[in-house]
Image: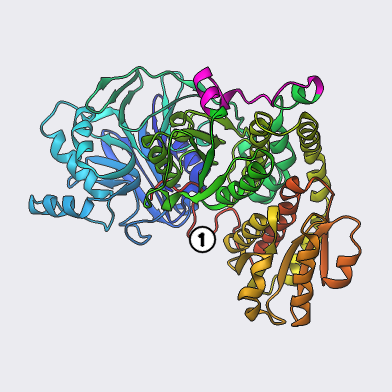
Amino acid sequence: MCGIIGYVGKQKAKPILMEGLKRLEYRGYDSAGLAVLDKAKVKSVRAVGMVVELEKKIAKLDLKGQVGVAHTRWATHGKPSVANSHPHTDCKNKIAVVHNGIIENYLELKKRLSRRGHKFKSETDTEVIVHLIEEERRKVNDLFEAVQRVLPKLVGAYGIAVISEADPDMIVIAKKGSPLLFGVGDDEYIVSSDAAAIISYTKQVVYLNDGEVAKITPKGYQVVEIGQGEVEKESVKISWTQESAQKSGFKHYMLKEIHEQPQAIESAIRGRVDKFIKEGSQTPILGGLAPTKEIRDRLAKIKRIIIVSCGTSYYSGLVGEYMIEEYAGIPVEVETASEFRYRRPVIDENTAILAISQSGETADTLEAIREGKLKGALSLGVVNVVGSTIARETDAGVYNHAGPEIGVASTKAFTSQISILTLITLSLGRQRQMSFVMGKRIAEELKRIPGLVKKTLKKEAEIKKIAKKYGKYDNWLYLGRKYNFPIAMEGALKLKEISYAHAEGYAAGEMKHGPIAMIDSNFPSLFIIPSDSVYEKVVSGVEEIKARGGKVLAIATEGNKEIAKLADDVIYIPKTLEMLTPLLSVVPLQLLAYHIGVSRGYDVDKPRNLAKSVTVE
């Protein structure tokens, strides 16, 4: 959701805030704004649309202040407008607040504040925060104490950053359910929702935990936990480089990240299977998955796994379900995280809850983990962002090491997640019935995958031509079976996200139970049909579609000449183990969605109504 950036130090805040907003724009681009303490006054500028619109407004403003906050918005309460843009200020425009999250009791608070004479200028939930701070600041010595008094009154999620004319060298930040961190520089600090926005200034960051509030001045910082007192916080070093978060000559981040998948998969498996392959060690090396003897013992006794995730991560979890059940013999359920805690899931101490999240901040997934832990489950995580909330709150887990993913539509995070799930399958399988020979075969083939992905990426020009041919169609059916059923759903999601065409992902065997009624010459079907154990079953579906005049685009294994006689167009992928075909079959689908979206004139990095990290329920 929304992106927050803040600065306090010895430099002008304005250029640092604007650069940070540009790097955070993938989190929301309905509107943007900043507030700077300039000559001891809060000076705020806001604009509807992308950050460039704000940039136009402030181009001629010489704001010299060295303390400020800024925000790029993904609208929740109130339509995109200047009035609803952040920062929001109090009645006298002396305090400014930026906020990521949702305040669930804002209407009740707004009514109370209005009765006490506060004037509201927006439709947002955020504005109640600044008016509450205004009231408390009159009663206490500084902004830090005022914010601490306000937070217990808020129900919901928040990451906030606050500045005040009465406290001119200070930013106060607080977190509950929405990501927030600050980078540590030389007598300067940069607040951000995401480390990717500050790596050009510092690689030392401090992550806030839920319930923590920080006072930051040029002289240092102090962190307290609400109701508990001061806490010691240590900075951690970010491993990413500034270059890794830039486009590097590609037209869009999405295309760059599609092409980074060989490296992302290599990073996911590097050092984790080599010893297993060469020396016959018992399992792949996944130290983070079993950091203590207690967790190793619990993991060995696990009788059931529940994978919780959302969106693209949910589909990687479905691939993991097939893998783990087939090769480790453990029953697996994959749950939509947003629904998980609203049921009464049956959980015990022999259950593991495995959360998958690129950002490690997905609100629904985080709450699902907390629900599982409350009921005694072992909690595990597969996340990309080091130090993220899910990484900190799970008992154990594995990092993707895919590097920053800026494009809103996930690509390289998805394939790195499947790579990690393959390693987890190997680890759990070797602890159970999987033979070393089988494990070694899977590990060796996984090592080959980055090269096979590179080979698949070389078909981009061919895929671009196919995208041009099929780009006019507004309705699609994506079909796959077994390991490639989740890939059909992921491919359909990519097309929806990027080109705004309607697409449905279906199990190929279910096609004749309803969706085939939609088929005609203007409703193409995309079949994922590698030469695997269910190939003949999927071929029958292709024939049924063709018999009804439907167009067929197929993703098939190299050397399969039979499918070319049935399908209108074929994109070939290299041969690999059945369980690993999703790592190859998804790549053409990503490129197809990308090129259709571009051909339609859309900004594929910032699809409408979407944000990279969903940090509110």
Q: At which x and y percent is residue 210?
A: 34, 33
Q: At which x and y percent is residue 424?
A: 63, 34
Residue 84, relative to residue 540: is it above or below?
Answer: above
Residue at left 66%, top 40%? 416
Total number of numbered discs in the rendering: 1
Q: At which x and y percent is residue 215?
A: 30, 25
Q: Secondary structure at mark 1?
A: loop
Q: Residue furthest left?
A: 116
Residue 458, relative to residue 175: is it above or below?
Answer: below
Question: In screen coordinates, is 442 left or right of 611?
Answer: right
| Mark 1, other Cα within 10 Å: few <14 / some 14–19 / many ≥20 | some
Q: Is residue 562 magenta?
A: no
Q: At which x and y percent is residue 482?
A: 69, 55
Q: Is residue 558 visible?
A: yes
Residue at left 21%, top 37%? 152
- Magenta region: which residues? 278-298
Using the image as rendered, state which of residue 274 and residue 87 is in the foreground. Answer: 274
Using the image as rendered, state which of residue 181 and residue 397 is in the foreground. Answer: 397
Residue type at mark 1?
Arg
Question: In screen coordinates, is 270 left or right of 56?
Answer: right
Residue 206, relative to residue 334: is it above or below?
Answer: above
Question: In screen coordinates, is 244 left or right of 192?
Answer: right
Q: Which residue is mark 1?
A: 608
Q: Is residue 290 magenta?
A: yes
